[in-house]
Amino acid sequence: MENITKDASLNSINNDQPYRTWYHFQPPKNWMNDPNGPMYYKGVYHFFYQHNPDGATFGKKMVWGHSISYDLINWTHLKHAIRPDSIGDINSCFSGSATILPGEKPVILYTGIDGKKHQVQNLAFPKNLLDPFLREWEKHPQNPVMTPPSEVEEDNFRDPSTAWQGKDGKWRVVIGAQNGDEGKAILYKSDDFFDWKVDPNPFFATDGTGVCECPDFFPVYVNSTNGVDTSVENSSVRHVFKISYLRRHHDYYFIGSYVSDSDKEKFVPDVKYTGSWKELRFDYGNFYASKSFFDYAKNRRILWGWVEENDSRQDSIERGWAGLQTIPRKFWLDKDGKQLMQWPIEELEKLRDNQINITGETLLGGSTLEVQGITASQADVEVLFELPDLQNAELIDPSEVDPQILCSEQYASRNGIIGPFGLLALASKDQTEKTAIFFRIYRTLDKYVCLMCSDQSRSSLRQETEKTTYATIFDIDPNLKTISLRTLIDRSIIESFGDGGKVCITSRVYPSLAIEKDAHLYVFNNGSQSVVISKLNAWSMKQAEFGMENII
Ligand code: DQQ
């Protein structure tokens, strides 16, 4: 394994900047958005990302940043991998994906903005396959390999997925597109990866959604939490199609059926998109343009997602950077086959330090308990709440409610019956600043449901930050006795995993008081029924190592 010399001075930048994260991925400086082309190659994880080399806002000449890691947690930043310097990308190198071709040959397909500002697809290959860090990339001389087909707008044809091989041996990719109000994903096929032909039938299309960005398409096992390579197609898998709808700025996924040798090759989702809050999403908070990859080293599928800033453009310029990535998440199909489950990768636990725990503590209605003994500004918290008898829950009609409105009206400090209960993260001592991540349980005529919120409405005394409340409602088992919450707190990001990873919500917050040593963490219950902290484990989190490769 090659040793890399890196300059670890980047870690000290974080000490002067309370919003710069300790263990979430960030480039050394400037604007970052979408995750691009994540992959594992010869013992090394590669992560590429949309980067503006010239400033802390979205740029006119976007490039692919490139970082490598042995564990997906500690990173070394390398030189930019793909820059706008050729016919097919002179005005920007937009998002795309990596595919590992037979013989362990990685290739990248990405969108270029050409001289006419049209969006076209280009290929790039590593210059030297013996370099495990794949530092240098070269572009295919015949780029672009795809130009906008008919019935696709020239400036809305982008973000090729990882390719997969169908039963006929042909390679396939899907590309996000738009025509008028219709959003679609276009299927292309190729025998050799160079010459691509468009399939006449859109692979996936939705009316009234506008452009589909960053499509992702892959199989998941029906009965295993293991991941599976993108070309696998048999009765032990189902397929997942993910799309990022620009107008909504959310990532939606659909579980469904796919066969590559059918007449009209397309993906058939089990449930059609209706645009309601009930759609399945990877994350109900601040999360967009996600991308997954199959990690064959550990047989798992991993998801990355972009987390945007919520304060002003001027704030980003002053800080000199903008944009985070979520902690890489392992994900798999739930036992019921109806949704995906997500969990932070196990490697994150290496940063856990200084554990404290609480067990069997009853939280009476209206009580708050401080979790002391950890650095509350950088922490990993896992709580298991023991629930009272669900029959006492309040009655609602879920067809009449919008979880986000419910969350903002019935916020953390209001009294309920079973809940609100949960955590107050990045809270000031006087609790004038706090982000409440909580559950509240309701009864409907035929089932029980749980509202999960990440309420950042009181997250900062600063006026100019956006203070959306994020929420969703999900079904729970009528015999449910406990519910879990895991929350990753990292200075200006709070990522929460409810009910074992069934529901994720990410918030971006900018406290003015609850910073570093002045940040506190509490558990609370504002329901009239008591809940018991069956088990709470919390850890201070050490800083991950971020460095630049020393270029000699
Ligand atoms: N961001 C990229 C596009 C993509 C969008 C440009 C999604 O390729 O559609 O930075 O955030």
Image (tube, helix red, strand yellow):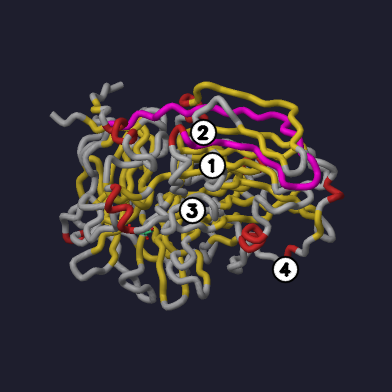
Q: Position of residue 169 (x, y in %)?
A: 43, 50
At mark 4, the secondary structure is helix
Residue type pointed to by label 4: Glu
Where residue 163 is drawn, which disc sits there? none
Say which label, 2 or 1, has the lower sequence index: 2
Inter-mark Cα distance, 3 to 4? 25 Å
At mark 3, the secondary structure is loop
Say which label, 3 or 4, has the lower sequence index: 3
Where residue 427 is drawn, which disc sits there? 1
Mark 1: is the Cβ under 8 angstroms from ligand 1?
Answer: no
Q: Mark 1 packing: few (<14 Cα in 10 Å), some, or many (20+)?
A: many
- Check if residue 116 falls in the magenta segment: no
Residue type pointed to by label 1: Ala
Q: Determine contact: label 3, label 2, CB under 8 Å.
A: no
**Circle 2 is placed at which residue position?**
376
| Image depth: mark 2 or mark 1 in front | 1
Say which label, 4 or 2, has the lower sequence index: 2
Evaluate whether residue 361 shows in this view: yes
Q: Determine contact: label 1, label 4, CB under 8 Å.
A: no
In the depicted view, which residue is nearer to us: 272 or 379? Answer: 379
Q: Position of residue 367 (x, y in %)?
A: 71, 40
Q: Determine contact: label 3, label 4, CB under 8 Å.
A: no
Please state the extent of the stretch shown in magenta in the rendering. Answer: 518-547
Q: Residue 127's image quarter?
A: top left
At mark 1, the secondary structure is strand
Residue type pointed to by label 3: Asn
Q: Mark 3 packing: few (<14 Cα in 10 Å), some, or many (20+)?
A: many
Q: Determine contact: label 2, label 1, CB under 8 Å.
A: yes
Inter-mark Cα distance, 1 to 4? 33 Å
Q: Position of residue 107 (x, y in %)?
A: 31, 45
**Circle 4 is placed at which residue position?**
400
**Circle 3 is placed at which residue position?**
286
